[in-house]
Image (cartoon, coloured by chain):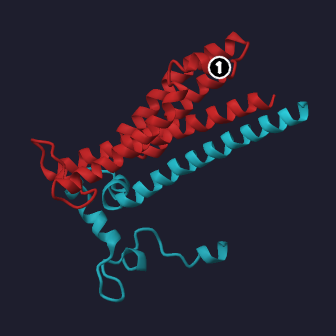
Chain colours: A cyan, B red
Amino acid sequence: MFFATVDLPTRGDADSVMNQEVNDNGNPVAGNYYIQSAYKDAKTPNIVTVVLGDYRSIDTLGEQIVVFTAGLILVLILSGHRKERKVSNREENS
Amino acid sequence: MKTGSESPIIVLGARLLSPFIMLFGLYVIFHGHYSPGGGFQGGALLAASVLLMRVASGTQISSLMVKESLTTPLGVVGVLIYFGTGLLAFLMGGDFLDYGALPIPGLSPEYLRYTGILIIEIGVGLAVMMVMILLYDKMATGEEEVE
């Protein structure tokens, strides 16, 4: 890993691949658009919030539904186990 | 019902800490436009303040903060706030989740997006908080039944 970090570009290097405005195919890069117009579009200084909440809001909606569904499924699993245990206890007692 | 700790020091310490954690959670949600943070992190902090009271003073007292029966409905409300905001923008003639089309009078599209991001962050925070409390409640109840 240390050997690989030697080849990494320095931070803020305008010539490195990840900082270019147009990629090798000639298409504009999305990250560049976000940095240039995040404040203009939503008047929010925090670019991460704008990307998460506005440009990529369907992704965040999916995340929230994943969290909610995981909670509901865990509740269903835990409730189911309790009933099984009650039944098995009753069988042992009788 | 999970009973609380016997020690008054633990209960008092939790009572002292819990409001500050809740305040910091609200700060993380509402200040997410200017500093690191947002709905997920703030929701986890809000849940932490309620769970601290749940662990320290028992379910019966801490259900004054959030009732056990309210966790699932409020989690659904959190998801619906997000989805409803997107759907409202869609019905008002914009794209789905394009907050620029929200029907709030007196705001330019830029500030409508600013407000829309805040509304969905509140929805995310509510859902995350309620799911975490729900999980603790279910686990605590299951533990009691096994004993």
Res A21 → quadrant: bottom left
Residue A27, percent across and down?
30, 83
Q: Residue at x 64, y 35 (%)?
A: B138
Count of picture labels = 1
**Front one among A80 and B111:** A80
Q: Residue at x 38, y 74 (%)?
A: A19
Q: Mark 1 falls within which chain?
A: B
Residue B80, percent across and down?
37, 45
Residue B145, percent across and down?
75, 29
Please tell me whether residue B23 is drawn above or below residue B90 in the rendered image: above
Position of A36 compared to B121: left or right? Answer: left
Q: Going by the picture, which residue comes out furthest to the top?
A: B8
Q: Residue at x 41, y 46 (%)?
A: B79
Position of B14 compared to A30: left or right? Answer: right
Q: Is residue B33 visible?
A: no
Please tell me whether residue A33 is drawn above or below residue B7 in the rendered image: below
Q: Going by the picture, which residue comes out furthest to the front?
A: A94
Residue B147, percent across and down?
81, 28
Give the residue type at disc 1: Gly
Res A34 → quadrant: bottom left
Please tell me whether residue B48 is drawn above or below residue B59 in the rendered image: below
**Front one among B138 and A91:** A91
Disc 1 is placed on an element classified as helix
Q: Is residue A68 visible?
A: yes
Q: Going by the picture, which residue comes out furthest to the left?
A: B106
Q: Residue at x 68, y 17 (%)?
A: B10
**Label 1 crowding class (10 Å Cα cut-off): few <14, some 14-19, many 20+?**
some
Q: Going by the picture, which residue comes out furthest to the bottom?
A: A25
Quadrant of image for the C terminus of chain A: top right
Where is mark 1, residue-wise? Answer: B58
Quadrant of image for the N terminus of chain A: bottom right
